[in-house]
Structures are given as C-alpha cells and as structure tokens.
Amino acid sequence: MKNIITICLLLATTFSVSAQKDVKLTLNHLLDTEDFGFNQTSQNDMGQDFKLTRFEYYISEISITHDGGTITEASDIYILVRANKTDTITLGNFDITNIEAISFSVGVGPSVNNEDPSTWGALHALSPKSPSMHWGWAAGYRFAAIEGESAAGLEFQIHALGNKNFFKQSIPTSAVDVSGSLVITLKADYTKSLSQIVVNDGLIEHGGNNEAATCLRNFQTKVFTSLTGEGNTLSAKNLKIIDAFTISPVPSNRNVIVQLNDHRFLNGSMIVTDITGKEILSQEIGLSNHINIDTKGLYFISLSGKGIKSSKKLIIQ
C-alpha cells in the first residue's frame, strides 16, 4: 500500500511540474505594415510624413487571462521596449494551458513610478538609462520617449509621463507553443502612436498633457493588436482627466479665471452647477476663460471633450 501511495504522489508531482510552462511575449515592431526602422519615411493618419530617430516606452503591470477566465499576474515584470530591437521577454513560469488575453499598461505603475531609479540593478529596466528615461522623482519615468523629424526637416519630440496617464488595456490573443514555451505575439504599429497629432510644425511636448496625453491614449487604444487584428477591449470613453484646468483665485470672489492646461478640451464645453445640480452657466471652453458668479457658495466646474471629462470644486466667498 505504501508503494502505491508513493507512486501516486510521484505521478501527481510529475503532472504538476509538467503543467508549468514559461510564458513569453514578443512584439512585432511596425510602421504601418512595414517592419520598424529609424529614419524610415512613415505617415500618420493626418497625412503628415515623418521619420523616427528615437522610440522607447515602458510596459508594466502585465497579467494573463487563461483557461476559462483565470487571471494570473506576471509580477514585478518591467519592460523597456526599444522599437529597433525585437526581443522575446519571459513573463514567468505558470500553470497555464490555453491563453485567452494579455493585459498591460504602457508606463510604470504609480506604486513604483516615483521611486529612486538608482536603487535598481544596472541591468534592470528601471535603472538609470542613457538617454534618460527618468524625469525626476516628482514626475517619475518617461512612459514613452518619441523623437523624429518632419517632412519639412523640423524636429519633433514627445516625452510622455504622469501617473494620470497610466492606462490599462487588454488584448484578446492566443499563444503558440514554441519548444515547450507559450509565446504571445502582438503587433505594434507605431504610426498610430502619433494619431491625430500634428508633427510637421516643430512639436516639442514634454509632460503629461496635450499631445503627450494623446500619445499615451493612442498606445492604449490604437497601437497594439493581436496577430488576428483584435485590439483593446477595455472602454476608453468618458475618461476622467486630473488637473486638466486650474481655477484662480482660490478661494474666489465673483470673478473667476479658468485656465486650460490640457488642450484636448479646447472647444469643448464648460458647465458650472451649484450644490443642488442646477446649471448656472454653460459655454465653449477656450485657453483662458473668465466667468462671473454673484452668489456665494459651493459650485462645480465640469469640462467635457471628446471622450474625456474633468471637474473641480469652486468656492465663491
């Protein structure tokens, strides 16, 4: 009987070990349908030609959906993607049979983003790099660093960052068994990172608003697809944007200035309501907006743009 039990335990252990597989991720770097290359003429969806000279970004907070909806986290995996290098990254060794989707974010998660990069080992993705991918402790890492040249020969740069722009996405995909490892392959079309961004007039945007925020949203909604063409399944509608505008003075008297920080709201709508929800005024939003409210009290200013919104409290004394 003891021998039978021992054999059963050995078989169970063998089965458990055999179910563990390395899961890997490969990104096919593309410019539209062509393989990625620096100084290669490409075009965005606004018909503007450009050439890229730098293209780097982070991927983190990766999870895998598999075997009927089970979610397994690929803990502590940070990938610094360089578009001119195709690597297959090992995400971990997991008890997984059938992969159904992969979820991740472009950037570095808020729990790590504002830490000191010098605490990481020299070979780690988050250690100091040259050229730098770190903006400083307060702002954290550059989630994406894109540089290039327009058809007119003007340089453009987008260094996009900010915890508010750390967006999750989920791509339905299967995996291929390669020598016992499950390999997930995604297509990444980097022309789409510049969708609806004017690059032909010398754009320089370093920060977390305007074209930088648009670029990171493009990474979430447009850049990545499975080999069969399926994209992000998570909704990106009516997103709440933090610090899209500032109010002055604070607290205010009857004369209030609303200064727009995020140009994506430009020509959208601004609505002011009182504490009961009654609309006090409504107008198109510009870069600098002057409003007058005579009655003291608590109010709310709400901005709406294409698929985005932002709001703040306003106190009139």
Image (cartoon, rainbow, N blue to C red):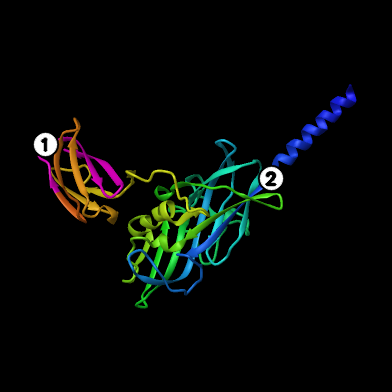
Q: Position of residue 226 (x, y in %)?
A: 51, 52
Q: Among all residues in the image, which is located at the extreme bottom?
A: 153
Query: Residue 203 in magenta?
Result: no
Q: Where is residue 262 in the image (x, y as percent from the top left)?
A: 29, 54
Residue at image mark 1: 295
User: SS at mark 2?
Assistant: strand
The residue under the point 81% across, 30% down is 9
Task: Write down the residue under mark 2.
Answer: 21
Q: Quick one: 171 or 309, which is closer to the camera?
A: 171
Q: Residues within 10 Å of mark 1 (few under 14, many from 20)?
A: few
Q: Is residue 313 shown to the viewer in this render? A: yes
Q: In the rendered structure, which amino acid carries the disc numbered 1?
A: Thr
The CA distance from mark 2 to mark 1 is 66 Å
Q: In this view, does 261 lie to the left or right of 148?
A: left
**What is the magenta segment's predominant secondary structure?**
strand
Between residue 295 and residue 196, name the one nearer to us.
Answer: 196
Q: Quadrant of the N terminus?
A: top right
Note whether 19 is above or below 204 in the view shown. above
Residue 125 shown left or right of residue 54 in the figure: right
- The reply to whether residue 136 is visible in this rendering is no
Q: In which quarter of the image is residue 206?
A: bottom left
Name the amino acid type tagged 2. Answer: Lys
Which region of the structure is painted magenta?
291-317
